[in-house]
Each structure stands twice: as structure tokens, then as C-alpha cells.
Amino acid sequence: MSTPHPSVAPPADTEGWLRTGHTRNEAAFRALCKLAIALPLCLLLLLAGSLLVEAWPRLGVGFFASYPSRFAESAGILPALVGTALLMALTALFSIPLGVGAAIYLEEYARPTRFTALLELNITTLAGVPSILYGLLGLELFVRVMDLGRSLVAGAATLALLLLPMLITVSREALRTVPRELREACFALGADRFATLRRVVLPMCMPGVLTGIILSLARAIGETAPLITIGALGYVAFLPTSLGSAFTALPIQIFNWVSRPQAAFRANAAAAIVVLLALMLLMNGVALWLRRRLQKRITG
Amino acid sequence: MATAARWLLVAGALALSACGKEKAVIRVDGSSTVFPIMEAAAEQYQKGAGAARVTVGTSGTGGGFKKFCAGETDISDASRPIKKTEDEACAQKGVEYVELPIAYDGIAIVVHPKNDWAKSMTVAELKRLWEPEAQKKVMRWSDVRAGFPDKEIHLFGAGVDSGTYDYFTEAVVGKEHASRGDYTASEDDNVLVQGIAGDENALGFFGLAYYLENKDRLGLVAVDDGKADNGDGAINPTAETVQNGTYQPLSRPLFVYVAKKALERPEVAGFVKFALESAPKLVAEVGYVALPERAYTLAQARADARKTGSLFTGGSQVGVSIEDLLGREDKGGK
């Protein structure tokens, strides 16, 4: 902090020097903050730019409609793209009811006992566990013990486990944003807990919950380690026909291509990365849009 | 409530997966080094009419054997021979296998293109440089050979979990999995290429294919094994010297292991036959070196006879040609 300048004429202008000192610091700090945001943004743009340049020649219809191949020019991402889409749909199907359900229980029904405190501690801890451990758990539990094999369901169930802690946390945050007065008003009108939840609390926190869901799915879409651990494949030349099908996913295909010696495969990897990034951006965009829309419905 | 829902979900998933039975699938998994070869074979094989489906995974040689010995896969790719412990694990589960060599891979010793002194090195010099005792001692080029410049030497190499590392240490240091630890290690050979291409004092080792794709950014070191009978003097790795066994000791065979039980299935036997027949062409296309023609014939005979067990029970054999090994066993009889 700056000290008052000795030469500045005393009392009359106290607020004056305060303000000037204030603005000078303010400007410096502001510049620092702008630099902090500009630096990663520039890096990101640089990265995305060079990626796009390398990827551009490969991003044709053929790339989306072909199976992988030993010839980089005719290789495509069809099974990986379909695998990723199905994986996301199934993961959402598994994790949303469990995650939102657990959040509702913890937030609306559970009494603050030692047990719930322990549960909460566990959930926060699990949120920080490295994803490969979920892969190992999935391999043992879903692939081996439950004998689901190296299938889509096993992959989706593993990713769902990975997402649950995050989903529960964001859903609880969203539930907490609904003012208590509203719940009390409902109870005063004679509604029970369930009716209150269904008619008032859930609709009000929906934007938050949905955003949380989509953002967690956008995180899951890039996960490679747990999928490789449970045995997702490097090469599949057919599309999944059932939940028990073997599968591959975009991050795995990318990983695969990046490690090839031939430079032509790196262009393929770049193109697949662009597709993956586009999917993530799309999901984040949808989250933003949904949030705006639903919020308008509630407030307006 | 959450637990009840979870069990319900599990039951549902089980029911769904049970009703979705697939048609015949040949499951291949294992080494990521061998992956391009099997991917090529699977791609070409599935172009044939009525072919079964083939899936290829990249769990690594060790991870692949774990699944293979648990009966989860039909064929396991390996960049090194099966280890004794893995062989025992397979035996315990009653998984018998047929060991088939599929290609050669050369390990190239690579330096920066501006390096004009290390055009060739002997195995003894490489050993002096890479053995565990060299750590923090052999730090300059002049320590490797008197006459080399008095400059720092920066080492790059495969990560310790890779088959490449296992083979390199066995061939150069003489003991599998023993080397100095103060070098830049990466499982991704492209990272090593970047590192060496940007460092004038660098020396490293990795798969020959990665050198051939980056020739203009790297320099090659010829290797002299000090034996006259398989090519005198220092020899550069090329498709030819790797195949005819003169680039020694850094040429290694790559394998596929086929479960004997899977081999009873006509589609698996058919796929293996196809892979061995088309290997010379496919192997070259993906950047590896094909075995001599006769080795594939011997391998096919081995598969036909369902000859189980490994020729390498004592670990990697350095400097022995696959042809000799297969042929020797052939003559040796039952």
C-alpha cells in the first residue's frame, strides 16, 4: 500500500490523495489481472491455431465415416466417435439418477448425524481421487466380478462412478441456492416434503443441476486412463451393436495415433483432437444456453 | 436409497448385456509396439468375405499377458518373449499357448545430426555408458572413448516399463532391467525424437521406425558387436541388416502368442494363417522389418502342430536368429 505523499497539502484534500493512490494501485492491479487472463488465453489460441492448421486437410467427410487404417490418409474416427457418443449417453443414464438422488437425500432428507458427516467427507475425498484408480476399480468390479467384459456398459459404469462425486457436489450446491423461506412457505401451505421438492425446489434448482451435469460429462468425454485400464480397444472395425459390445473412444484413438512414428498419423491425431474439443465446446455451450433459458423461465 | 438404486442398475445392466450376444470376435491385446502390425492384419483380414471380427487392444506386453492368462483374450502381442512368471500364471489357469514370431524391430542408437564424432560405437562402449555403475561417473563424451570431445553427454531412452528397455538392457548391459537411472526416459518415442533433435550432446535409443521417419533431424550411430562372424565392424541398422542378423545385438523379434484353445476355432486359425502369410508386406508397410520367408513357414508349421510353450524360457536371447531357433527345435524333435 502507498503511504500518503508528504508534500500533499494536509487535511482539506484527504479524500483526494486517497483516491489518486487508490486509482494508481487499482490500475496496476487491473493490468496484472488482465495479463493473468491474457497469457493462458494466448497460449490456448496458439495451441488451438497450430492444431487447426495441422488438422484442417484431414477434416473431411471421409474422416468421420471411416474406420481406422494402417494408411493414415484413409483412416477415420467412425468407431471412436460412435463409441464416445454411446459412452456419454450411458454414463449420463447411470450417473444422473444416482448423483441427483444422492444430492437430494443429503440435502433435503438426511439429518446431520455423524454418519452423514462421514458420507460427505467421503464424497469430497472421492472427488479428488485420480481417474486411473476408478479404472482399476471398474476393471475389478464391472469387468471381472460382475463379468460385464470389456464392454460399453462396463466403460460407462466406470465413468459414471468417476463422475458421481462431482455430480453430487454440484447438485447439492444447486439445491442450496433455493431459499429456505420458499420451502417453509410450502410446508405452511400444507405441502409435504416430496410435493415441495417436486413443485418448488427441483424446478428452481434445475438450471444449476443441468449445468453441473453437462460440465461433468464434458470432463468425462476426455478421460483416457480409466478406459484404457478397463480394456477399451485400440482397433475396432465395427460399430457397437449392443451394450456388451467392445468399443473404442476418441481419447484412445488420439493417444494411439500420437505415438505412431509416421508424421501423417499426427495430422490424424490433430484432427481427432479438434473434433473432441468441438464436442466439449458444444456441451459447454449447451450448458450455458440451458441455464439462461431455464433461469428466465423461473424469474420471468 | 442410493445403494438400492445402484443394485437395480447393476441388475439391469447385467440383463441387457446378457441378451446382446455378439457374433464371433477374435480378441487381440498386448504390446503397443506390435499393435500397428496386428491392426494392419486385422484391417486386411476383415476385408475378406465372411471374416470374423477382430479387435486389437494396447494394454502393453505385461498387461496383455495378464488378460491372456486369465483367458480374456485369444491372442497376445508381445515385444519380448513371455516371462517365466507369466508362463506360470498361464499354466495355473490352464491356458496353453503357441508362440509365434511375427517381425523384427531394430533398436537404433541415435545422436544429433551435428554430432560428427560418434559415427560408430562398440557394444562395450555402450555398456560403459549405460550400465548402472556409469551413473554420475560417465558424464562426458570423452569418458566413453578417448578422442571423443570433452563435452557433456545427455542420455535419452525408453521408459523402464517398456519392452524396448528390457531388451536394450539385456543386449547392451548384459542384465535385463539394469541401467543407469540418470537419463531422460519416455514411453513415447516421439518425445525422445524431439529431445535428441534439439540437443547437440544427446545420445539415445528407440525403435528404428522412429529414426527412419525423422532421418533429417537425427544422426545414426553404427554398432559394432565385436564379433566377426555376423558382419565385421560397425553396422548401421537398415531393413536389410536387421533381417539378415548382421545388426546385432540390437535387433529383436516381436511375437504373438495364440491360446491353444482359441486356435481350435476355425476363425482364429484362419486369422493367424492370414497374419503370417501377409506379414512380409504388412510389417514393412507399418515400419517394421519382416522375418526371413522361411521363419514364417516354420511359424505356420508350429501353429499347425499346436506346439505349445516358449523357446525363450530363460528370458530374451540376444544374437540368435529366429530362423535358427525355430529350425533347431524342429530338428530337435518332440
Image (spheres, rainbow, N blue to C red):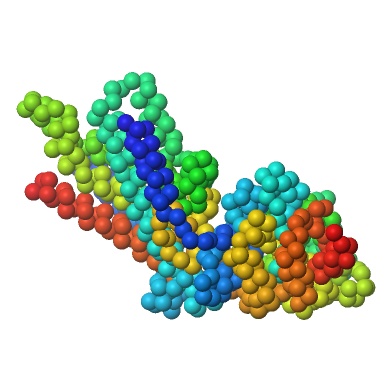
- Identify whether A257 is placed above or below A56: above
Q: Is residue A181 left or right of residue B227?
A: left
Q: Position of residue B65 (x, y in %)?
A: 65, 52
Residue occupying image coordinates x 32% and y 48%: A93
Q: Is residue B145 left or right of residue A150?
A: right
Residue occupying image coordinates x 44% and y 73%: A66
Examine the rendering and report whether any part of residue A152 can be seen: no
The single residue placed furthest to the top in the displayed view is A113
- Identify whether B173 is placed above or below B8: below
Q: Position of residue A79 (x, y in %)?
A: 44, 65
- Identify whether A61 is placed above or below B311: below
Q: Position of residue A77 (x, y in %)?
A: 44, 68
Q: Is residue B184 left or right of residue A185?
A: right
In this orientation, which residue lies closer to the viewer: B12 or A194? B12
In this orientation, which residue lies closer to the viewer: B146 or B210? B210
Image quadrant in which you'd find residue B297: bottom right
Q: Position of residue B7 (x, y in %)?
A: 38, 36
Image quadrant in which you'd find residue B258: bottom right
Residue occupying image coordinates x 29% and y 39%: A100
Image quadrant in which you'd find residue A123: top left
